[in-house]
Image (spheres, rainbow, N blue to C red):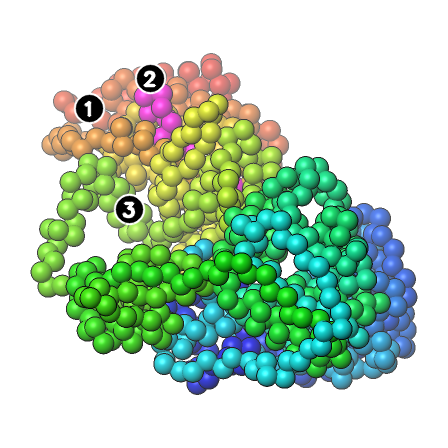
Amino acid sequence: MKISLNWLKKFIEINETPEDLESILTEVGLEVDEVFSIAPDKKLLRSLVVGEILSIEKHPHADRLSLTSVDLGDKKSRIICGARNISVGQKVVIAKSGTKIKNTNQKTLEIKKTKIRGIESDGMICAEDEIGIGNAHDGIIILPKNSVTGKSAIDYLNIISDTVYDISLTPNRADATSHLGVARDIKAVFNREINIPEIKSFTNTETKNIDIEIKEKTACPRYAGCIIDNVDVGESSNEIKNLLTSIGINPINNVVDITNYILHSLGQPLHAFDLDKISKNKIVVKYAKENEKFLSLDDIERKLKSDDLVICDGDEKPMCIAGVFGGKTSGVSSKTKSIFLESAYFNPSDVRKSSQNHMLKTDASYRFERGIDPNITVYALKLACVLIKKYCKGKVVSLVYDIYPKKIENNKIEICYDRINKLIGQKIGEVEINNILKKLDINVSSNNKITIADVPPYRVDVLREADIVEEILRIYGYNNIKLSSKNGSDYLSEERSGSHENIILSRVMDLLVSSGLYEITTNSLTSLKYSTSKEWDRSGTIEMVNKLSDEHAVLKQDLLYTGLECIKHNLNRKQNNLKFFEFDKIYNKKNKSHTETKKIGIYLTGLLKEEHFNSSPNKIKFFDLLNLVNKLLVIADIKNYSIEESKSKTLSKCFEIKHNKKSICKIGNVNKNISSNYDIDQEVYFCEIEWKNYIKSFNHEFSFSSISKFPEVKRDLSLVLSKDKKFSEISHIIDKNRRNIIKNYSLYDIYEGENLGDKKIAYALRFVLQDVNKTLEEKTINSTMENLMVNFEKILGAEIRK
């Protein structure tokens, strides 16, 4: 969820720097994922020009791209564009070839004449984020019709400076899904006043009326609305457009923009119906008929389900899926003169069902699903009417209808100060607790030694005393809670020291950290889009029934996908040399049973070491990952393991390490088609360790032996083989003919070149021979090496170079 600092200042005084405010928001539970600074470079903006789209054709080699002919005043250019909101006759912002632009990430790019899918494109039609004047990227900037073709576009752009916070809102914080909600938390921290917009100028007459029938009172506890006449539908004011574009919303028209403004200001979704399209001048709120057809705003005909709550006209034909999405036939258009403006409170579970039924995630459904404030409904409606009167010349010509048969009361929670302090672990005075709760609009009263906290209904997550404690701690500050001196280290580490598995995990993690890796923790829920890829086992997918979003819709069945998200996140922030590991569970479904499997994922990409003047930069290679895995095998004292080539849907050049015929891990480099989906263009190496098999093979008892007093002997051997022969075949022959005196062997060089031919490869091997009981004789050494050479020639067809 995006919050604009300029917008926030309309509700509360803010003197803190953007950086300090970021820390404050995170401390009170509104975790800031990212901060965007909108600071347009006016010098670069002056080089942009106004263009007029003359024609649009489909790109012959790309379904999502269009070929446009654009008039630039002094010439016409062909520009390839991927935006969906382009149409002939539009005045747009053009960056000519050779022009430099700076995006919202403050990255400067030079536009060049280039070929896209085989066809030349000369310039770029710009979106807001591409030229740094906003965060919207779902369409190009459309300039006013009176813009002069060929002139500088800066004169027609709404240029603002702002700071935008991208907040990762937890599902329980429905109260913070608006700028007002965020302002409430700031008010509680600094004890400042909230500035609520005035509606004293609201006026209405009663010259028109409309019938409203609520057939499903449980699904729609409150329904309000009014009729507004003489509406002049057109372009929004610059103020509203600037605020909407700052958080990535494209302005549509003044009526729709005002409803969006109210939604993001107060958290109350509104919906405007064209009054002339409401049959029989009647609104009916009911459940849809099974398979009833409904044409939604996105021009898709949908089949409704019997549990979809819908807003119907007098003929009981659906005009809107309640709280989710509007209909095409009843929406506001440029010809609309009269509207019925709806402001309602719908049952969260009903909205969630409809949203899931049709896989529709909208700003309105996001709020209704979590639970909005039922007592702000009429205020939000009247504020919208005031704005429509101001910007659209509309007049309210009916009653403000408010059907609210059973008021949703405050939640009263019995609290005990002693219990609160016990849960906190530190004594906070009663006066301070009461002050904190009052700042959060939670009034405290005492009667007959019973203390009651009166919680407003917009705080849907505060239901019990423990929730009250959480609210107190958010504002008091978790960092202000001191760790008791009575706690000892034996208590804090009791569970870890008592678990055999945790001891092994601790050793593994210590080794990985000491090897330069960082631990990551990713969500068990991952994106629905991964389950549609060919690499994903769809039959084993476990999908959430009531998923909060498509981004957290299925349980992960592989550590790789969420790990790649983490790599992408870091690469986007110029961190190119990454070494990560993760210990987590994956989830699968087989028949009717579900399984949880613990695994360790290791991810390496970029350079092996950071660049330094004293050493040359070396890219991470497969053997760097293999060496790391070998260290894990060493601390587990796992010997006599095999390394075999293996097939994998996600890894190319995949190898599997087995011990006692059980898989310990798979290692390889990530398939390019997978990494490219994350915009990762550098090699990523990945290992996934089967934790259950690893700890079963883990040997705590190490054996020691004295160093032999008899010397080692080294012999080198060069084999020239066909490239289709694998090194594992060489290893197999050596292991079969060790004769107890081949202590060790290693591959110290590989050669390919013109001298050998295209189909040959040379391996240079070094053997270490030793007899622990006596000094090796030359005869024994030669016999052992001759035996190996004969087998290499006979079995592999090798050419021996001594």
Picture coordinates of residue 776 (x, y %)? 21, 23
Find the magenta span and give its range.
657-670
Q: Which residue is mark 1?
A: 771
Distance, label 2 to label 1, CA atoms, is: 15 Å
Q: Dot 2 corresponds to which residue?
A: 737
Task: Name which residue lies at 23% across and 76% down.
Answer: 431
Q: Position of residue 446 (x, y in %)?
A: 24, 69
Q: Is residue 72 visible in this depiction of the protein? A: yes
Q: Residue at x 23, y 68 (%)?
A: 447
Residue 509's disc is 3
* Callout 2 amino acid: Asn
The Cα atoms of the two marked residues, 2 and 3, are separated by 37 Å
Judge whether residue 27 can be spotted in this image.
no
Q: Position of residue 474 (x, y in %)?
A: 33, 67
Going by the numbered disc 3, the residue's amino acid type is Met
Residue at the image position 64 percent from the left and 80 percent from the top: 202
Q: Are marks 1 and 3 in contact (CB under 8 Å)?
A: no
Residue 288 at x, y percent in the picture: 67, 43
Which mark's residue is nearer the viewer, 2 or 1?
Answer: 2
Q: Depth check: 75 or 370 in front?
A: 370
Q: Is residue 411 above or below residue 790?
A: below
Q: Describe residue 247's horizontal placement relative to residue 115 as left or right.
A: left
In the rendered view, would you say 685 is above or below 213? above
Could you say which disc has been placed on residue 255 in the image? none
**In front here: 360 or 409?**
409
Amino acid under label 1?
Asp
**Secondary structure category for the residue under label 1:** loop
Q: Reply above or below: 446 against 319.
A: below
